[in-house]
Amino acid sequence: MLNVPVTQAIPDEAVPTWHGEIEKIIVAHCAGCHQQAGSAPFPLTTYEEVSARSAFIEAVVQAGLMPPWLPSDHGLPLRGSRGLSDSQIELVSRWIQGGKPKGAVGLPVERPPVTSPREPDLRVSMQEAWRIPAEGGPNWGRRDRDKRSFVVPMNHNRTLKVSRLMHRSASPQAIHAMTMLADTTGGGRYLDNREEGPGYYMPGDIHDRPSGSLGGSGVGSRSLVLPDGYHWSLPADADLLMQVHFRPTGRAEHLQESVDFWVTDDPASRPLQTLISMVWRVDVPVAETRRLMESWTLPVAVDLVGMTPRANGVVTSLNLNATLPTGERLNLLDIPEYDPHWRMPYMLLEPLRLPAGTQVNSSWVLANTTENPRNPFVPLKPYITARRTGVVAMLLHVATLNQDDQQALMSWHDEMLRSRQRPRRSVKSGLEPSDTSR
C-alpha cells in the first residue's frame, strides 16, 4: 500500500504553478502513456485530470514507481528518458502541497507529435486477431504465460533500410512490450503451423538470432527512431516475426498488432548488427541469490547505438559496462531494480565508438527467493533452464566502420555463440553467490 504524503503548508512565493513548471513535466514524462487510447489506465493531459489525481501522483512519484524508467543515472545518456530528477520530484510535491495553483497562462507547452511527419513507407499487420486470455498461468517451461510470437508476411521484393518504426496496438493497456526479427529461414512459419490459430507459444528467436534484432517497443515508447546514418536491414521477402509480451487484464482482449516502417535511401547509412551478451544455462538453487557474468572482447571497432535487456522477473538488477584498451571503464547501462513489465530497447543519446580490443562485461543478479516480489516461480523450486539465445541476455545494437569489418564481426560472433553451447566443464563459471553489492 502506498503512503500518501502529508500535506504541509508552503509559502506562496515558493509554490510552482501548473502553467509555469508542472505542465511541462507532465507532458514530457507522463502524457505519452496517460492519454486517450494510451497504454495507461487514465489520461493526464489537462490540469483538471492531473489535479483530480494529485495525491496518488505524489505518492507514486515519491516512491519512484512512476514514471516507469529502469536505468539509473550511472549509465550513458539515453534517448527518450522518462525518469524524473530529484528537483522535478520536489517541484511536483511542492505544487501539490501548495494548493495546485494554475498560475499565469504563458506560451503553449509543445506536445510531442502523435504521428510521424510523413506516411510510413511500409505498414504490416497481423492477418488474424488472437484473443489474450483473461487470466494468466504457468506453462510447461515454468515461465509466465505472458508472451506469444506471430509471423507477419511483409511482401516486399527488395532489401529495405529501416530508420524508424512504430508499433500500433489494438489493446495498448494489455501489451507491454514487443520485439522483432526479420526471418528469411521459414522457421517462424514452421512453428506457427504446429499450433492452431494465429501465432505460437515459443520465444520469437530463430536459431541463434534473437528477437529484438530488428528493434522493438515498450510501454511509453511505441516508436523507435535510429540516429542519422544507421539503419536496420529488412531483407527482401522476409517475414516479420513479432514476440508480443502481454499481461492479462481480467477479461479477454483483442490482439492484432501492426508495425509502421520508415526507410532511408542514404547510401552512407550503416546497417546495425546485434551482438548477444548472455548466459545460456542458469542454475539457481531455492532461496539463493546469484550473480551471473559474461565477458568478451570486440575483434573490430564498432559504434554502439543501443541496447535491449532480456530477462524475466527472477532478475533483480543488471549492468553492462566496457573496458577500453586504454584501461578506461565505461558504464553503458545500469538497471538497479529490474522489472520485466517495463522491458524495452534503450537507444543512446549519441552513438559511442568502441575500439577493437574493448572488453564488454555484463552481469545479472538473480534472486530465486520469496523476498523477490517479481519472482514468477512460487512455490520455489530450483531455477534450472537453458536457451540458445540466452536465459538472461543483453542485445547490443552496433555498426561496424566498413563492410569487411562487418563480415569479420559476424563470423566471430557466430563462432562465439557456438562455443558457448558446446559441453564444457566450466559451464557454471559465470555463476557466483552474490550479496547484490556492485
Image (cartoon, grey):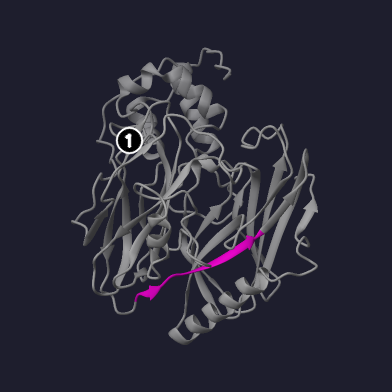
Image x and y of residue 157, in percent: 23, 73
Residue 76 found in image quarter: bottom right
Question: Within the magenta stretch, is there residue 271?
Answer: yes
Name the one closer to the observer, 428 or 352: 428
Above or below, 261 relative to 418: above
Question: Within the magenta stretch, is there residue 414?
Answer: no
Q: Quadrant of the N terminus?
A: top right
Image x and y of residue 309, in percent: 55, 54
Q: Is residue 438 visible?
A: no
Q: In the displayed orientation, state which residue is furthest to the bottom.
A: 404
What residue sits 24% from the left and 52% below the top?
Answer: 116
Residue 129 found in image quarter: top left
Image x and y of residue 363, in percent: 68, 56
Residue assigned mark 1: 38
Above or below, 403 relative to 121: below
Image x and y of residue 209, in percent: 49, 66
The answer to whether residue 120 is left or right of residue 211 is left
What residue sits 31% from the left and 43% below the top?
Answer: 169
Type of residue at label 1?
Answer: Gly
The answer to whether residue 302 is left or right of residue 380 is left
Count the marks: 1
Element class at badge 1: loop
Q: Is residue 333 visible?
A: yes
Region rendered in magenta:
269-280
What residue sits 80% from the left and 68% below the top?
Answer: 425
What residue sits 37% from the left and 61% below the top?
Answer: 189
Secondary structure character of the magenta stretch overall: strand
Above or below, 361 relative to 336: below
